[in-house]
Amino acid sequence: MTKVTTTTKTSRHFSSAPRSAAHSRLYAKAVIPETIDDDVETTKHYPESPQERKLFPSPRTHRPVTEFQYKVYDVCRQIPLGHYSTYKAIADHLGSGPRAVGNALSKNPFCPLPVPCHRVLTSDRYIGGFSGDKKSKIFFKKAKLEKEGLKFDESGFLCDSMQQSRFFGEFK
């Protein structure tokens, strides 16, 4: 396990790009989680065959994982370590909408590996995309991505220097 100390951050924005008040509120005085699991320790079994997929109930919802969810997870699994993609890029590849992709990833029973949904950002390269307890989830996601080599500004946006070189959109 990698230890992350608990700290308090105050949002400061130095970039010329506009940031929403909602983003600033999420980063103001947010508490970072105590630990970040190593991916190796949290890898889960991923059903490969159609028969296995039909029989696999989601541990989160106890319902079958849908065909569309598997399509999203199959695409998301292609994002390499140290890279990111966007909800829109995945949606465009699947001929779907970004919200549908986000909804599927919000139900991901295979995170963080083998389906690394933490590597998916919004189109404006914001780390968010969560519902519920946003602060701890955002800092968990940010810590995992920083551990993989990505860098973010204090408002939770991917640093400009990373946007082109680390983007992955070559889905099969």
Image: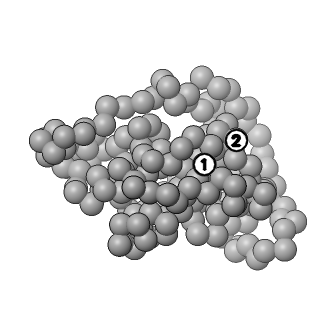
Which labelled disc corresponds to residue 149?
Answer: 2
Taking the image as shown, residue 168 lies to the left or right of residue 143, namely left
- Total numbered circles: 2
Taking the image as shown, residue 111 lies to the left or right of residue 39, namely left
> Residue 152 in the image: x percent, y percent?
74, 53
**Is 135 drawn above or below residue 19 in the view shown?**
above
Which labelled disc corresponds to residue 83?
Answer: 1
Q: SS for tag 2?
A: loop
Residue at figure coordinates x 48%, y 24% from the top left:
41
Q: Quadrant of residue 164?
A: bottom right
Q: SS for tag 1?
A: loop
Task: Indicate the amino acid at tag 1.
Answer: His
> Residue 62 in the image: x percent, y percent?
21, 45
* Disc 1 to disc 2, C-alpha distance: 8 Å
Taking the image as shown, residue 171 lies to the left or right of residue 67, namely right
Taking the image as shown, residue 44 lies to the left or right of residue 116, namely left
- Residue 148 in sight from this viewpoint: yes
The quadrant in which the N terminus is found is top right
Q: In which quarter of the image is residue 147?
A: top right
Mark 1 or 2 closer to N-term?
A: 1
Q: Quadrant of residue 51?
A: top left
Q: Do the residues labelled 1 and 2 touch (CB within 8 Å)?
A: no
Which labelled disc corresponds to residue 8?
Answer: none
Residue at figure coordinates x 64%, y 70% from the top left:
124
Residue at figure coordinates x 45%, y 48% from the top left:
78
Residue at figure coordinates x 52%, y 60% from the top left:
169
**Is 64 drawn above or below residue 157 in the view shown?**
above
> Residue 163 in the image: x percent, y percent?
70, 60
Colour mode?
one colour
